[in-house]
Image (cartoon, rainbow, N blue to C red):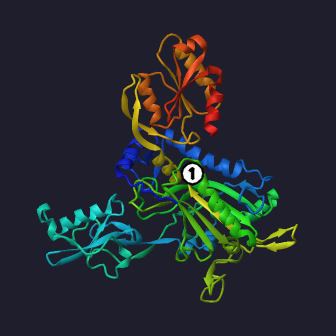
């Protein structure tokens, strides 16, 4: 599997600029200076993200045919959906382990008051004039090596002509490899030794339910959508009569109080997930894990991500959660990541029966290679489960068991960002006079494009605007469409190219004669003459490919 680097800070800057200029993404509360880690999708961005979610829901849930055996699947299966609440009973998070374990370690700088994730801080040992220091880079820096070099020159008070006196005695390494912080220069700090020891930071957002506002009424915004599916397992089975194996899909908001949100929408405090919890017989779980692992990877390829910048990585044993017998990440080489680095798009986890058992019995922990109930100092369950029966009885085999779970968990925001990064290109194309000029284009898959077509009268006379308005109304009945009659036709083409519109339909003088229009393809620039009343069918057929 090829893994070509996509590192390109300039491309990322240009994409971010385009996103704001064309109404794809804005920083939340921007007029008040913004709120770090929160983003608003603009008129075009909301369409793109909605298309990502709808494509996922259609391909994974809605269009699934339970009567057909899919290639690679051990058996036929069913798919249903849920939409669970963001705030759930606090005991949910205690039994799932989030209450005790869902945290990152952070360090604080006593000089700058900055706060950083311990595992994200990178640096290098540097020496000059008998002094030695571990120079760190801000985790938000686009080029850590360059940032460290600049800060080292400043720390040792060196001019460019004295650069030869500076020596780096280590490669880029994590702060976690150090036992002593006394010689560490924190980001933006002027003195070494200002970092505190790492301490735990719970990632769940706390809130209060009810009017009294006391600690007894404390609850949490969900950090993942999965638990809502697990606690509803019995309800789904009893109300829909689905048979194991079956999957439950859900799309919804989740919240994590990230210490250092960064890289545009890649790491945010409010984000949207597209998750499936697939329940299956224990003896078939490994096969189902392989099936979903491969199917989800192929979906990203189908939707336009390049196989050169996409990879499927199996977790090492040390990375696995205590309940997991296998996890794979689908990762993408985002332009803001250093060469050789990949960012997670989706995780596919074999969770065993951990979740259903936890909500039935109480919080489970690993002991001697087995999952066992965690007890407090008095020998009682630390976090008691619901006591509800989460087992499943198969009336065909006459067996009762707790299903194993395969979890494909994708980020809608990260997927949208990956599709935008992949689609964003700057190339050369002929203008209306045939001269080659530069253009910005979003080569989005037609299913993801905010508009599927734009209707463009060549000139604002001779009845062309009237014909264009009529065709626009017809096409709007089939798919999102845009109408534009302002500026030269070449400029209007460029406007549509940079927001990803796959087809431009031009009303020209020939339309007045024979009722045909020109359909221009965004990617190939080929132009086809199509009868006006056949345009909708022509474009819909192209979109399906």
Q: Can the viewer see residue 225 in this picture?
A: no
* Residue 454 position within the rendered picture, expressed as x and y whole percent measured from the top left: 53, 28
Mark 1, secondary structure of its residue: helix
At x 84%, y 68%, the residue is: 394
> Is residue 327 placed above or below 456 in the rendered structure?
below
Viewer-side residue, 145 vs 209: 145
- 181 or 295, nearer to the observer: 295
Q: Is residue 191 left or right of residue 453?
A: left
Pointer 1: what residue?
A: 301
Is residue 328 shown to the viewer in this render?
Answer: yes
Residue at the location (66% across, 65% down)?
Answer: 290
Q: Locate the C terminus by quadrant.
A: top right
Residue 291 in the figure: left or right of residue 320: right
User: Relative to 237, does residue 494 appear above or below in the rendering?
Assistant: above
Question: How many labels sit on residues?
Answer: 1
- Callout 1 crowding tier (Cα within 10 Å): few <14, some 14–19, many ≥20: few
């Amino acid at each position: 599997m090829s893994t070509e680097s996509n590192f390109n800070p300039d491309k990322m800057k240009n994409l971010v600029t385009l996103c704001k200029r064309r109404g794809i993404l804005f920083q939340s509360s921007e007029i008040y200076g913004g709120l770090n880690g929160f983003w608003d999708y603009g008129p075009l961005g909301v369409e793109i993200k909605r298309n990502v979610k709808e494509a996922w829901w259609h391909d994974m849930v809605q269009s699934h045919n339970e009567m057909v055996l899919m290639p690679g699947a051990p058996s036929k299966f069913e798919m249903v959906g849920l939409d669970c609440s963001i705030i759930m009973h606090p005991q949910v998070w205690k039994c799932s382990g989030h209450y005790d374990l869902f945290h990152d370690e952070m360090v604080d700088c006593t000089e700058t008051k900055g706060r950083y994730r311990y595992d994200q801080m990178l640096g290098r040992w540097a020496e000059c004039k008998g002094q030695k220091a571990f120079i760190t880079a801000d985790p938000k820096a686009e080029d850590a090596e360059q940032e460290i070099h600049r800060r080292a020159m400043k720390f040792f008070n060196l001019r460019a002509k004295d650069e030869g006196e500076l020596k780096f005695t280590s490669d880029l390494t994590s702060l976690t490899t150090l036992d002593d912080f006394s010689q560490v220069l924190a980001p933006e700090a002027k003195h070494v030794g200002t970092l505190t020891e790492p301490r735990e930071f719970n990632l769940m957002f706390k809130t209060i339910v009810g009017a009294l506002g006391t600690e007894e009424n404390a609850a949490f915004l969900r950090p993942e959508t999965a638990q809502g599916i697990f606690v509803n397992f019995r309800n789904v089975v009893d109300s829909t009569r689905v048979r194991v194996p079956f999957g439950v899909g859900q799309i919804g908001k989740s919240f994590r109080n990230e210490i250092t949100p960064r890289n545009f929408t890649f790491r945010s405090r409010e984000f949207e997930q597209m998750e499936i919890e697939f329940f299956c017989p224990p003896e078939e779980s490994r096969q189902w894990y392989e099936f979903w692992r491969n199917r989800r990877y192929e979906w990203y390829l189908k939707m336009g991500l390049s196989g050169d910048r996409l990879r499927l990585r199996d977790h090492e044993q040390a990375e696995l959660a205590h309940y997991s017998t296998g996890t794979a990440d689908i990762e993408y080489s985002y332009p803001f990541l250093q060469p050789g680095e990949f960012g997670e798009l989706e995780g596919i986890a074999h969770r065993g029966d951990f979740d259903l058992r936890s909500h039935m019995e109480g919080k489970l922990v690993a002991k001697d290679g087995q999952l066992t109930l965690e007890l407090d100092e008095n020998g009682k369950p630390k976090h008691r489960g619901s006591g509800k029966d989460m087992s499943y009885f198969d009336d065909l085999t006459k067996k009762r068991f707790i299903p194993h779970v395969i979890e494909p968990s994708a980020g809608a925001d990260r997927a949208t960002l990956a599709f935008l990064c992949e689609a964003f290109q700057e190339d050369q194309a002929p203008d209306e006079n045939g001269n080659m000029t530069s253009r910005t284009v979003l080569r989005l898959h037609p299913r993801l494009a905010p508009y599927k077509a734009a209707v463009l009268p060549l000139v604002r006379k001779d009845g062309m605007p009237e014909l264009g308005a009529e065709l626009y109304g017809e096409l709007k009945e089939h798919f999102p469409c845009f109408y534009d009659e302002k500026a030269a036709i070449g400029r209007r083409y460029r406007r549509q190219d940079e927001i990803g519109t796959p087809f431009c339909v031009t009303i020209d003088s020939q339309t007045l004669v024979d009722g045909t229009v020109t359909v221009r393809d965004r990617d190939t620039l080929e132009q086809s003459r199509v009868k006006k009343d056949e345009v909708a069918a022509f474009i819909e057929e192209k979109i399906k490919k």
